[in-house]
Image: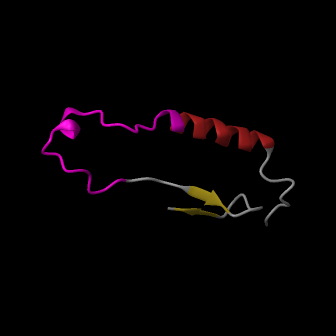
């Protein structure tokens, strides 16, 4: 059963999520780091992967991931 928005998520959970987001953000690479990427013959990437999760407001169980 979904909890009231005022009760969910607990502050401890929010703090954990914020720390994890900051940890992941620090690992993002936004520049070419490999020699093959700077090679003039390299024409770019074809595929890039990523992940996102969003919880249903007021529900600590149901979520959507993509």
Picture quadrant of residue 31: top left
Q: Residue 37's x, y, as percent?
A: 22, 39
> Residue 30 or 20: which is nearer the viewer?
30
> Residue 36 or 8: which is nearer the viewer?
36
Q: Is residue 64 left or right of residue 33?
A: right
Q: Residue furthest left?
A: 41
Q: Is residue 18 left or right of residue 49?
A: right
Q: Disc count in the image? A: 0
Residue at the image point whose x is 25% and y is 34% from the top: 34
Residue at the image point whose x is 50% and y is 62% from the top: 66
Q: Residue 15's x, y, as percent?
A: 72, 38
Extent of the magenta region? 25-48
> Taking 53 as reference, is 20 above or below it?
above
> Taking 42 as reference, is 4 above or below it?
below
55 falls in the magenta region = no
Residue at the image point whose x is 48% and y is 54% from the top: 51
Quarter occupied by the N terminus: bottom right
Q: Residue 8's x, y, as percent?
A: 80, 53
Main SS, magenta residues: loop
Residue at the image point whose x is 59% and y is 36% from the top: 22
Q: Residue furthest bottom?
A: 1
Query: In this figure, which colouring scheme has been used for the structure?
Result: secondary structure
42 falls in the magenta region = yes
Q: Residue 24's x, y, as percent?
A: 52, 38
């Amino acid at each position: 059963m979904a909890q009231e928005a005022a009760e969910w998520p607990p502050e401890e959970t929010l703090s954990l999520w914020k720390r994890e987001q900051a940890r992941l953000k620090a690992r993002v690479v936004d520049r070419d780091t490999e020699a093959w990427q700077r090679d003039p013959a390299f024409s770019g990437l074809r595929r890039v992967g990523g992940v996102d999760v969003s919880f249903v407001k007021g529900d600590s169980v149901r979520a959507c991931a993509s």
